Image (tube, rainbow, N blue to C red):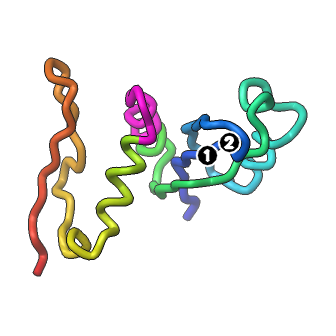
Amino acid sequence: MELFKVYIIKSIGADRYYVGSTSDLEKRLNSHNSSRAKWTKRYQPWEVVYTESYSTRGEAVKREKFLKSFKNIKKFLDVDEAWSHPVTAGLVVGSSPVSRSKKKKNLTFNIKNIS
């Protein structure tokens, strides 16, 4: 079964991030780092800093659009890093991991302890 990846890449030379989705991450990263790239060409080289896997292209595209809705993707990466911290490692995000309030522009989490 083919898996679809949502990825975040970071420019090594500049403080820039790019969010995308693909079924072949290695090929896509090579494309971002090639001379044929359009937007990503000016901030090369790029490295992968985050990935998620999905079983359908539709799920991956939906998640990609959600991540692109963040004004600052670094805040999302900081939250993800916090979940790997020993204090939060025993927690699981509920069925709607992150929801965004349109009025308040805040992130909310549904958390349950699995211990």
Residue 7 percent location from the top left of the image: 55, 48
User: 35 above or below 48?
Assistant: above
Residue occupying the point 80% across, 48% down: 30
User: 43 above or below 105?
Assistant: below
Please rate how many residues cluster around mark 1, counting C-alpha atoms within 10 Å: few if below 14, some from 14 to 19, many from 20.
many
Residue linked to disc 2: 11
User: 21 above or below 110?
Assistant: above
Residue occupying the point 17% across, 27% down: 101
Residue 105 part of the magenta segment: no
Query: The residue under label 1 is which amino acid type?
Result: Ile
Task: Say which quadrant the C terminus sits in.
Answer: bottom left
Nearer to me, 45 or 1: 45
Asked if the residue at tag 1 contacts the one at tag 2, i.e. Cβ–Cβ closer than 8 Å, the answer is: yes
- Estimate the spatial distance between the alpha carbons at disc 2 and disc 1, rounded to whole Å: 7 Å
Furthest residue in direction top, as rendered: 103
Q: Which residues are magenta?
A: 62-74
Task: Give left or right: position of 72 versus 48.
Answer: left
Residue linked to disc 1: 9
Nearer to me, 101 or 94: 101
Residue 109 percent location from the top left of the image: 16, 48
